[in-house]
Image (cartoon, rainbow, N blue to C red):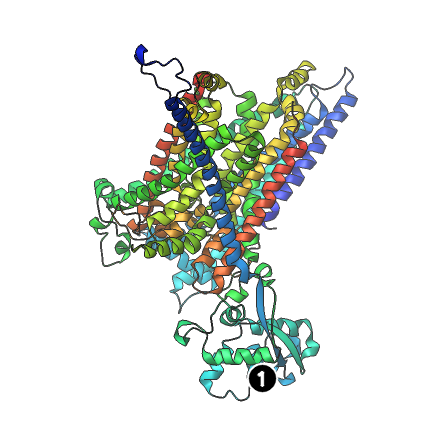
Amino acid sequence: MIETERLPSAEIDSNWATSAAAQERLRQRRRADTRLWLLGLGAVAVAMGLLLILLGSIVSASRTAWTQTSIRLDVTIPADAIDPENAARARYGTFVDDALLGLFPDIETPEEQRLMRSMISNGAQFFIRDQVVADPDLIGQTFSAWVPAADRIDQLHKGVVNRDLPPNRRNVTDSQIDTYDRLVEQDRVRSTFNWTLFTAADSRFPELAGLKGALWGSFYLLLVCFLISFPTGIAAAIYLEEFAPKNRFTDFIEVNINNLAAVPSIVFGLLGLAVFLQVFGLPRSAPLVGGMVLSLMTLPTIIIATRAALKQVPPSIREAALGVGASKQQTVTHHVLPVAMPGILTGTIIGLAQALGETAPLLLIGMNAFITAAPDSMLSPSTALPTQIFIWFDSPERGFVARTSAAIIVLLGFMIIMNATAVFLRQRFQTKW
Amino acid sequence: MTQSLVIPTLIVLSVIGFYLGRQRANALRDASANGGLATLPQYYGYYVALIAGLPAFVIFVAGVLLQGSFVDWLLLSSVPAEMTTDITAAERNLLLSSIKNAARGTTFGTPPPEILEAAQNFAIYQSIVRYALIAAVLAAAVAGLTWARSRINPAFRARHQVEGIVFALMVLASLVAIVTTLGILVSLIYEAWRFFERVPVAEFLFGLNWEPQIAIREDQVAGLGSFGAVPVFWGTIVVSVCAMFVAVPIGLMAAIYTAEYAAQPVRATIKPILEILAGIPTIVYGFFAVITVSPFLRDLAAAIGIDMAPTAAIVAGGVMGIMLIPFISSFADDALNAVPQSLRDGSAALGATKSETIRQVLLPAALPGIMGGVLLALSRAIGETMIVVMAAGLTANLTLNPLEGVTTTTVQIVTLLIGDTEFDSPKTLAAFGLGLVLFLSTLLLNILAIGIVKKYREQYD
C-alpha cells in the first residue's frame, strides 16, 4: 500500500528499508500482487472452463442423435393388393404389419401385437412405399428392407433406456424388450448414420424428424437479410463517412445507429409483428418477413463495420483520385470501396452469422410453427435453425433431447464456418497502410 | 408469370436500358461534328438503367406490401353490406379468414352462401391484383426506359443526374436507422396505447398481481388486478442482478489479467477465445441452462439441504452471466488500455507494485469506461430473451430469493404473443405495454452508457 501519512522523524530508522518490519511489509505487498495475478488468471480459467463445459455438455448430449436404429423386415407386396400404375396408393401399413407379425407367429394377443407394432416407426410404411415406387418389379415379391425403429426402441438400442429399471419407470414394456432381444438374435437390428437428420423436414416422431426445412428456412432468411442490409448498410456508411456534413442531423443518425445496435432483439420482433404482419398483412412464418426483421438488426453491424473499413483507407488515395479529375463518387466507387471491400465483407459475414443464431424475433413472427415440408419460396411458411432447436427443445419425446443438441451443433458448425471465412478474408485481403 | 420473376425481369430490363443508352450516346458522339458528349458514354447507360429500374422497383415493393390489404378490402366490399357494418376488427378478421378457408376448401360443414360467393371472388381478386401489379411494374420500367433514352443528347449531363440519384439513395439508406427507431417507437406506443385504454397505466406500472392468462376467457372482462406488472419487472431485475454477480467479477478480473499481466501472445490467444462466448447464440445458452446447469445446481442445493425450484432465477441469471463475461471484459480491457502509459510509469516510479498500480491508479482512471460496459451489459441482460424463455419460470413471483422461480418481461412478451395472436385482446396488447417499458429502459441504459464511455474517452485524447 502506498502510505501517505508522515512518520515522526524520530521513528525513521537509518536502515528503514532493511528492517524486519519493512521486509515483512514488502512480502505482504508482493503477496497481494500475486493474489491479484492469480485472481485474474483464475477468472480467465473459469471463463474458458465454462466455455468447455458448455460445448462439452452439448456434444455429449448429442451423442445418440447421430445414429439411427433400423430393423430389417421381410416385406411381401402381394400383386393383387396394388395397382402398378398407381403404386404409391396402396395400404403399405398393412404390409409392414404383416411382415413384422410374421416374424413372431407366437405373439398372438392383440395387446402384444399392438405393442410390437409400436416398436417400428410410424413412417416405416413410407420407406417401403418409396422403394416400391422406385422399383415396381418388387410388386408380387418378398424383399428385405431396413425401416427405422420407433424412438423408444432406438433409445433402448443406444442404451439410453435402462432395462433394469422397474417397468413403470421406463417407456418400453418387458414384452417389447423381449421382442427386441429376439430381433437382435436374428441379426435384424442395426445402427447407421442418421441421414434423416439432414434429408427430412420436421416431424412429430423423433426418428423421422430432420433439419431440411430449417436449413432451407435459414438460407432464405439470410438471403433476404443480405439482399436488404448489405446494399443499404454500405450506402448509409458511405454517405456518413465520405459525404455527410458534420452537423446535428448526422450526429442524430449516428446516435440512432449505435442505439439500434443495442436494442433487445425481441423489440425487433415486436416491430415485425406490429408493422410487417399487422399493417402490411404479410403472411406469418414467412422467411421474407423474418429476413426483413433480421436485416434491420444486422444493418447497424454492417454500417459500423463499413465505416471502420472506410476509415482505414488512407486519404492519399482519395486525394490522388480527386487530383486526376475524378468526381467524388467516382473516387469512392472506383478507388476507396475496392480497397475497403475485405473489411466490409468481414463485417457483413459476422453480422449474418449473428443473424443466423437469432431466435427471439423469429418466435414473434411465427417461425416456430410445426411445418413438415421445406419452404419452396420466401413466402411459404417455414422454420429456421434456431427456432427448430426451440421446437425440438419443447417436445416431450426422449429422442428430441439428443436431436436438439445435434441441431445446435449443426448451427454452431455453420457459425464457425462463417466466422472462419470472415477471419480468412481479413487476413488474406486486408492491406496494412 | 409469377411475382418472383418480376425482379429478374427488372434487372434484365435495366441491363438492356444500360446498353441502349450507351449505344445511343456513342452513336451521337460519332455523329456530332464538334466533339463529343458532356460525360462519358457509360453514364448515359447508367442513367437509362436507373430510370428504367428504380421507379418500377419501388412500385413493385409497395405493391407486394399492400396487395394483401387491398384484396381484403375488395373482399369486404364484395360481401353484403350488413355483414361488414359495425363489426370489430376481430370479427372482420374472422370473416376474412373464413372466406379464405372456404376458398382453400378447408371448412367444417357448409359455410353460408355469402361466404361461398366471396370465396369464389377471392381467387379472382387475387389474380387480378397480382397481374395488375405485374403489368404496372413492367409498364413503369418500359416507360422509364423509353423516356430516359429519349432525353439523351450530347449536351445532357448524365453523370450529374446519375450521381444525384445515387446520392439521394445513400441519404435514404442512412435514414433507415431513424425510420427503424421511429417505427419501433410508434408501433410500440400505438399498441401500448390501445392496451392502456383497457387497463389503466397506474394499474400496469404499480399493480402487484400479474395473471394475464385469465383475461382471455370470454366470460371474464379483463380483470383489472391481473395486469400489474411489478412482479414481472421485479423478476427481470432479480435475474439481471444474478447475471451481473457472475459477469462483473469474472469479466473484470479477466480484463485486468489480459490488459496488465498477460504477455502479448497470451493476450492474443485469450481474447478471441473469450469472444467465442459472446458469439454463441442465446438459444444454446438456454439449452445449456436447462440440461446442465439446472440439474447441477439442484443437486448441489439438495446436497446442502436447500430447496431449489428448477426454474430458479439463479439458473437463468447465472448462465446469462456467462454470456456477458466477454462483454464486460472487452469493455474493461479497452478502458484499461486507454489509460495513458505515463500513469503506470509514474506509479511504478513511486515504488508501487503492479497490483497497487492497478487498484489505486488504473481502476479509478478506467472506472467510467468500465461502468459504461457494465451498464451496456445490464441492458443486454434485461433484454435477453431465449435464456429466460427456456430456463426461467412463467408465473410471476414477487420474491428476493434467487432460488425461487421468477418470470421476466421478455418471457411474458414471448408467452403472450407465441402462437396465433388476436390483436384485440388485452392479453396480446399487454405484450406491447411490456415491450414499450423494455425498449425505454434499455434505451435509457444505452444512452447513459454510451454517454459515459464517450465522455471518458475524450479526457485523454
Above or below A368: residue B102: below
The image shows residue B361 at horizontal and vertical percentages of 41, 21
Q: Position of residue B310 (x, y in %)?
A: 34, 55
Is B136 positioned to the left or the right of A401 in the image? right
Q: Is residue A17 found left or right of A223 in the rendered image?
A: left
Q: How many marks?
A: 1
Q: Is residue A354 visible?
A: yes
| Residue B157 image point, x, y percent | 65, 20
The residue shown at (39%, 41%) is: B246
Q: Chain of mark 1?
A: A
Residue closer to the observer: A278 or B261 = B261
The answer to whether B225 appears left or right of A28 in the picture is left
Foreground pick, A99 / B350: B350
Disc 1 secondary structure class: helix
Residue drawn at (75%, 26%) of the image: B26
Residue for badge 1: A103
Amino acid on which the number 1 mark rests in the picture: Leu
Rendered residue at 54%/25% (across/down): A239
In the image shown, does B133 or A299 lie closer to the viewer?
A299
Characterize the local packing of mark 1: few (<14), some (14-19) or many (20 or more) Cα atoms within 10 angstroms: some
Determine if residue A275 is in view. Answer: no
Comparing B227 with B260, the one in front is: B260
Percent of width and height locating residue B245: 36, 40
